[in-house]
Amino acid sequence: FQKTKTSADTLSENFLIQTILSIDEVKQKNRYLDSLTNHKHHVAVIIEKPTADEKSYHLKVGHNGELRFETYYNFYIDPLTKEISIVDIYSGDKISIQKWRQRQNENPAE
């Protein structure tokens, strides 16, 4: 795991990262990236604090390459309820992880 430092506060940062890293799909992507790079790279997490327009933490999970950050997942965590949502790549909507997994099972090739 590699953390990309942003303006997220230190107390919440640990919780946010551990929460995201505990998601099965993120674990699987991390194992894949680790294997693909001969144990040199892991998933990276970029944390953006809530704003006036976006009330949730935005966590980008991906690979921090030499030329750019390649985003695999866009998660949001509500700071009050700690509910996790993910951006659906087709609609652009934030949906629950349960609904996202259901869609993945319906369309396994995507």
Image: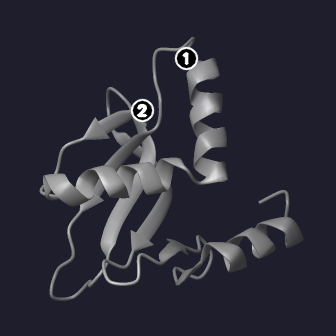
Residue 29, percent from left and from top: 61, 40
Question: Which residue sits at x=55%, y=50%?
Answer: 22
Identify whether 12 is placed above or below 37: below
| Amino acid at circle 2 | Phe
Q: Quadrant of the N terminus?
A: top left
The residue singled out by tag 2 in the image is 1
Label 2: state its secondary structure. Answer: loop
Residue sitting at x 39%, y 56%: 60
The answer to which image quadrant residue 11 occupies is: bottom left
Q: Which mark is residue 70?
A: none
87 w.r.t. 12: above or below: below
Q: How many marks?
A: 2
User: Which numbered disc flags the more N-terminal residue, 2 or 1?
Assistant: 2
Q: Position of residue 10 (x, y in %)?
A: 15, 52
Residue type, numbered disc 1: Thr
Quarter holding the C terminus?
A: bottom right
Q: Which residue is mark 1?
A: 37
101 vs 12, left or right, is right
Point 21% across, 76% down: residue: 50
Q: Is residue 15 left or right of residue 101?
A: left
